[in-house]
Every structure is written in structure tokens, then in C-alpha cells.
Amino acid sequence: MSQPRSSLSDRLSRAPAVSPSQADHARRLVADWQLLADLSFADLTLWVPLAGGAWWCVAQVRPLTASTTQPEDLVGVELTGEAAASFVQAHRGGEPVVEEPDGTGSAPRSREVLPVRHEGAVVAVLARDRRLSATRPPSQLELTYLDIAAELGAMVSAGTFPPRMLEDAEMSPRVGDGLVRLDGTGRAVYASPNALSAYRRMGLTGDVVGADLAELTRRSATDRVTGEVVAAHIAAAVAGRYPDPLDVEGEAATLLVRALPLQAPGGEHGALVLVRDVTDVRRRDRALMTKDATIREIHHRVKNNLQTVAALLRLQARRVSEPAAREALLESVRRVASIAVVHDTLAGSREDVVDVDDVLDQVLPMLGDVASVGPAARIVRVGRFGELPAASATPLVMAVTELLHNAVEHAFPEGTPGRVELTARREGHDLLVTIADDGSGLPPGFDVAASKGLGLQIVRTLVTSELHGRLEITAPAEGPGTVAVLTLPGAGRARR
């Protein structure tokens, strides 16, 4: 029997015997258990008890170092009776249970069931299924992996692993990237071939095995301060603490170093150090940072230039006596200033996205500054636009400000008080923007497609050509005024 698929958090919340803190511990375990699966050469499944004696599989992971014994997806499967007998035994006794080897089927396997303990209580069980090995003797690498896996398994049963959520699990070093086993004094007793190669690229010429790895790493670092920090990081793991992964840069390589404490069942301490060569990744990161900084500087300069243009236009408007010319110049000031605000936002952003709400908060006060009507018309915002790519945000802000300016300028003649409501809402993947006023309404026979006004021509061009959307301007169903609706396909998926 199986239950519908859902997230791990949802599945744990439906297990009555699992408290919120225990569920957090289970999530920490699942976030970091690829390490245990790879060292064990085994499939791992996490089982929690349900009412009525059933056991429910809430998570599953397969090893990257061996073929799987569980090709089928077990998440959501329930076991009862004899099939779950070892789960009940491990849960009640609080000790690992080893089942009789199963030699049947296409993938003969052995199974060990580990109790998962948190704050003294067994909250779940971890089944470790390993394919029965061939007759050849295991290599030193395999023996080391299995020894470390046994210690980590004992720490899972004791509730000491993992201590907290692993940050950036995708970037964390894997077992196959490079592994060094340290004894209780911090000396390396085993280093995998990939770990040796990584340290060679760091500039190491001596042996790793037998050396104090913290001191060796410190000497290999090109930056003295970083070397000291990473050395302290490794020493902390030997002392039983869980430091965060760190980068260390050598002569020709940058390594990401993760150190974990190990505690053998007999109480002897040691540490596991995983290393990953991230030279190319960090080089690309630096290139992206340089590119981002250049783009932000360009946006900053464009903003400054646009503000200069707006200031010159405003100065010219003050010197012009013809009202129509002055109005045209002030409208140009508003348009240029709106674009400048978008570039100002992009100059301070780490991503090529714009918080449209933030931009509008800066642009809307400009409408009162350049409108001849003055502050009689009140603009009210409803809903959030969220973040949009810069390519969409710039034309959207310009279109919205044009429509708002038209409403403020033309819907309320001679400073008549009124209200303009700007609403943003989402329907599926579409973003709908509505500008509604309670002013004098549309002239007889108005057709938005045939309008000769410069502002509406700009809006039509922006909406259809840049945003690939639709513009409708109609009278409201009830009462006076005008309603303009922008429909932008795909923009409804904007981040909020």
C-alpha cells in the first residue's frame, strides 16, 4: 500500500508520532544523507511509525558509488507485520538490527536498520540496503568508506549526526570528489586518490598520509589568513565540532573543504575531511561578479545622464512662455525621470530584476510635480506588482505612468477632487493592471486604437511591442470615470 506523493515536510507532518523538532531533525538528516549513502555503498530509506502499527517510507536516496538495490520508488509505501518487524525491533530497542541477507531476486542484498535518535528519543528508523558483494576482496578505499559509514551510522543512532541543516548541499563536496580520514590527533590515516590529486594541484609536494592535515593545508594556502582559518576549521572537526565548509586557494587550485567529526562506537574521535576542486566554479563566479559590477555601473551612469537630461528639460520648461510647449517639456521630464528611476533601481540590484512597487513608489510623486492639475486627484495603489525582469519592468512603468498622468491631467478638469486607483492582480500566469478613475469619463466615440494622443500612442507601442500584451480603455460598468486595463501574459509569475 502507498500514499500520495508530497514534500518531506508534508509527509512528516502527517506522522502523528513525530513532533515538530523531530521533523526538523529528520529534514537535516535527509539533507545530508547522500554522504552516508555513498560511504555505505547502500540505498537509504527513512521510515516513520503510523497509527495501527504501520511504517511509512518518507524519504529515499540511492548511492552514487554503487548500483542500487531499490530501483523502485519506495516513498509513500507502507509496511506492516513481518515486513516491518526489524523496524519495530530497532525502534523499541534503540539499537541497530541486521536482517538475514536476502539472496532472492535480481539484486541480492543485506539490510541494516538503524534507529534515528533525537534528544534521547527514537523518532524514525533508517534502512540501509547494500548489494551483496562479489567474492573479490574490498580495496583500501572501500574498507575506509565502510569504516566511516559505520561510525556515521552509529552517530545517527546516537543522535549526534547531523547537528544542523547543511547549507548549500548542492555545492558541498561529495565522497568521490576527495576524502581524507583523520585520527584523533588530526593526522591523515587515509587519503583517496582524488584528494591527493586535489592537494597536488594546491602545490603540495610531500605526503598527505601521516601529515597533520590542518598544518599541511595552512602551508599550501597562498593567503596566510585563509590558511589559518581553514586549519582552525579542520582542527575544530577533530575536536568534535561541526565547522562550516570553507574555500582555500593554493598555487593552481581552489578547494572547498568540509570537515566533519567522527566518533567510533568505542568513543575514539577522529574527523572526515571532504575536498572538492572548485577552481573553475570560483573563476566563473568572479567573472560573473565583475560582469554584474560593470552592468550596475552602466545603469548608474545611464541614470545620471537621464537625470541631467530631465534637469535640462525642466530648466527649459521654466523659460518657455507658450503653455503647450511648456506642457510638452514637462511631460518629457516625467518620462525621462521614470526611466531614470528604473535604472537607479537596477544599479543597486544584484540581479537583473526590478521591484516594480519600489519604482512606482518613487515615480508616483513626480506626477503631482509635473501635472498642471495639482494635488487634487488622489492616487491609490491596490495589490503588488512584485519583481519583473528589467526588460519588462521599464516599459511597464512607463505605460502605467502615462496612463496615470492622463487620468490625473484630463479626468478632473480645473482641479476637481477625485480618485485614481491603480490595481495589480494575477490571473493564472497573466498580470492584470487596472487604472480606474471617477472623473469626467471618455469623450463620445472614443477608440483607443484610433487615438492620436501622444501619451496613448506611447502606451500602445509599449504594451503591444515591448510587453506583448493588450490595452483596453472603457467606461466603468457603473458610475462616472474611465477604466484602463493592461493584460500582460506571463508576467503573473513574477516574484513577490
Image: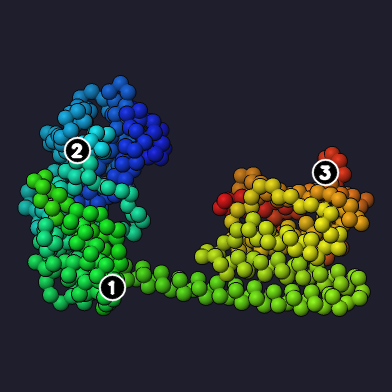
Looking at the image, residue 148 lies above or below residue 391 = above
Q: Is residue 171 left or right of residue 142?
A: right
Percent of width and height locating residue 413: 91, 55
Residue hosting label 2? 114
Q: Amino acid at mark 1?
A: Val
| Disc nearer the start of the sequence (3/1) | 1
| Residue that extends furthest to the top in the rendered view of this protein | 52
User: Between residues 64 and 15, which one lies in front from this camera angle?
Assistant: 15
Residue hosting label 3? 476
- Rendered residue at 88%/73% (across/down): 325
Q: Residues within 10 Å of mark 2 (few under 14, many from 20)?
A: many
Looking at the image, residue 397 lies above or below residue 305 = above
Q: Find numbered disc 1 in the image and state the secondary structure of the residue it sits on.
A: helix
Q: Find numbered disc 3 in the image and state the secondary structure of the residue it sits on.
A: loop
What numbered label is drawn on residue 475?
none
Residues marked 3 and 2 touching at CB (< 8 Å): no
Q: Amino acid at mark 2?
A: Leu
Query: Could you tell me if residue 65 is visible in this image?
Result: no
| Disc nearer the start of the sequence (1/2) | 2
Q: Is residue 111 left or right of residue 55?
A: left
Q: Quadrant of residue 26?
A: top left
